[in-house]
Image (cartoon, rainbow, N blue to C red):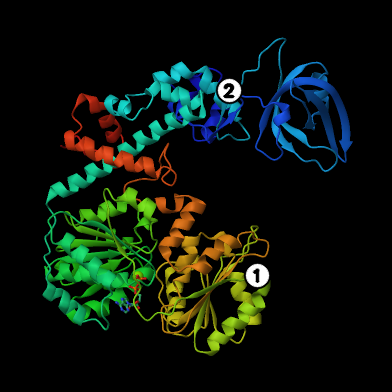
Amino acid sequence: MVRIHELKDVGPKTATALLSLGIGTALDLLQTFPFRYEDLRFATPTSQVKIGEGEQNFVGTVISVNERRVRDLEIVDARITDDHGMLTAKWIGRRRYILGRLHAGMRIFVRGRYEAQKIGAPALNVTQWRVLGDGEEYRGALVPIYRASKEITTRKIHNVITRNFQTLLGLVGDDPLPPALAKELGYPSLPDAYSQVHAPDSPESAARARERFVFAEFLTMALAAELRRRQREHEHDAQMMPGSDTLLAEFEASLPFALTNAQRRVIGELWADQARDIPMNRMVQGDVGSGKTLVAAAAIVLAARNGLQAALMAPTEVLAAQHASKLAPLLLPLGITVEAVFGSQGAKSRSAATQRIASGEASLAVGTHALLTDGVDFARLGLVIIDEQHRFGVAQRAKLRSKGGSPHTLHMTATPIPRTLAQTYNADLDISTIDELPPGRTPIETYVVRLSRMDRIERFIRANVARGQQAYIVAPAIEESDAGLSSAIEVAERLSTKTLADLRVGLLHGKLNAKEKDAVMQRFASGDLDVLVATTVIEVGIDVANASVMVVLDAQRFGLAQLHQLRGRVGRGAAKSYCLLVPADDAEDSVRLAVLERTIDGFEIAEEDLALRGPGEFAGTAQSGTSGLRFGDLRDDIAIYKRAKSAAIGILAEDPTLARSSNSGLRNAVEATPSAQGLLTSS
Ligand code: ADP
Ligand code: MG
């Protein structure tokens, strides 16, 4: 491995600056791609200059140079002419330096934006310029622009790459793309692709070259996922849990309401998976309030009727407790017993619980990661349910699975994955979607309200409380801070002593310990509090049917998907519910928030969030490790992903273990994927 400071033109300072950009090795440097190019190839005739376009290039002879002052600014103007006409170029600052180098009669290259001026004719605001030598014909390049920093410029990064290009190329391993495939797709060779990315001949060849890397990356990812799926399907070591129409009818008869069509369909999908000896790996996604708990209950019922236990893990104790209390009444009529295991539990009740799990007496164990501690053994674990899985680490998941051979695994999430992203997960994770809300709900009304109308908001809360309802107020910060965000402590203080002093106001935030949190939630749930001021600890899953108002302060600070989650805390009972999104008065973001006024469809909101904020927020949901992509972007490159995925299926059809020599580069790439470790060596 060539280390970065061993490269030409890289001293300790540059090495440190590169490192802080995440460029730690020489290969990293080569694989750091520009995010855009500046096109300096062509000079525009001055007669064709246009106001307000992007930056434009001109080459001409300087006729005159003048200086002037506008308030504190020192400005140099130069008149420039070419065969076609004339324009004024303008430099701001660095007067002495510019005047020392710029003289009438010389030929120069200038680049900048041509803009209208407050006083006088439009001028070119110069961002780059260069004096041309005697008789030098102007030749510009397509200049790559890299993500840079205060410590290192894009130009320096480009220079280091150019100076060391051959050395860097020598570090590149095998081409992951099989030669025939690269040829078929019309991609340049691997060295040419690197060269066209860092020093392209044309924008088209740069794009083509980049696509080669994106395609190879997606192909590797799709192969790894497909191999993982095949291995899972190959194992045949899961417990078979056949169901029947009779059992489904029995389950439905025990419920106080009829299943929705979506619930029935998803239960069918789960039961079909659970009936096989191939371990299920399925995610159920459904909007808040779509009735996921019931679907989970159906999976548990099937396991129990087949003599197998289930484990359900939630990210917090509050949520785990809530699951337990929602599941128990659904399961007890069918004779299925629920046991909760918590970190905060007393030693005695804990050991009683773990004993009933170990003996098999309890059919369902509910808990947080405490379920993973070594004290908890299962008699016959057949099903693992993970709620809001992205809050669990991969290692934790693996550990839970290890407690019971190859249990069927069910992930549940209320954060809908945008359809576009969901396609990329499909390879290893099957997805079921509950796309229908139970009947009889009045939709939540949502309004964006400015902070300066807080008095009206408080009046609104008071009116709802007077009707016997309850309200949440969410603030982004716990305590007062420099950031100037609303703080839950402060808001609770103000409301309970001043504006809502006659109401019962509670406070919930992440710095309270589990006992204190539980106590506050209990009081709110039982109606002993009218208003709950909270941080986003209440985001996921909390269910108080009597709460009908959700107020979110500093709403501009939250993603749309997260706001949608918060909104889902109300609208769970019979009363009409409201969500008031309150951006700070100076926030310029109300257009984005208006999406929530318009729709209650979590999928549509997720798509909007994806478009506005990028896939980062969803990346955590990825089973297949789609985060950490080096070249590709799942939002922009989805078409390339689809092509790569079908190429992956085609390759595996002909060469299921990637044993052919033409696939050796691909094989290496797949083996280097952390989530695919050992998949090829074992087969
Ligand atoms: P989620 O977990 O998806 O947010 P829940 O499972 O908590 O939703 O269900 C939300 C509410 O809807 C619960 O009060 C539940 O009892 C009710 N519910 C679920 N399914 C149905 C149904 N088919 N018909 C009527 N109400 C339902
Ligand atoms: Mg739920």
Q: Is residue 235 left or right of residue 342?
A: left
Q: Position of residue 19 (x, y in %)?
A: 52, 32
Residue 395 against residue 166 in the figure, above or below: below
Q: Position of residue 3 (x, y in %)?
A: 45, 23
User: Which of the pair 636/620 is nearer the observer?
Assistant: 636
Does residue 3 appear in the picture of this structure? Answer: no
Q: Position of residue 356 (x, y in %)?
A: 19, 71
Does residue 526 appear in the picture of this structure? Answer: yes
Image region (quadrant) for ligand 1? bottom left
Asked whether mark 2 and ligand 1 are closer than 8 Å, the reply comes as no
User: Which mark, by number, is residue 451?
Assistant: 1
Quarter that holds the N terminus: top left
> What type is the residue that disc 1 sits on?
Leu
User: Which of the pair 401/99 is nearer the observer?
Assistant: 99
Residue wearing tag 2: 141
Say what secondary structure mark 2 lies in: loop
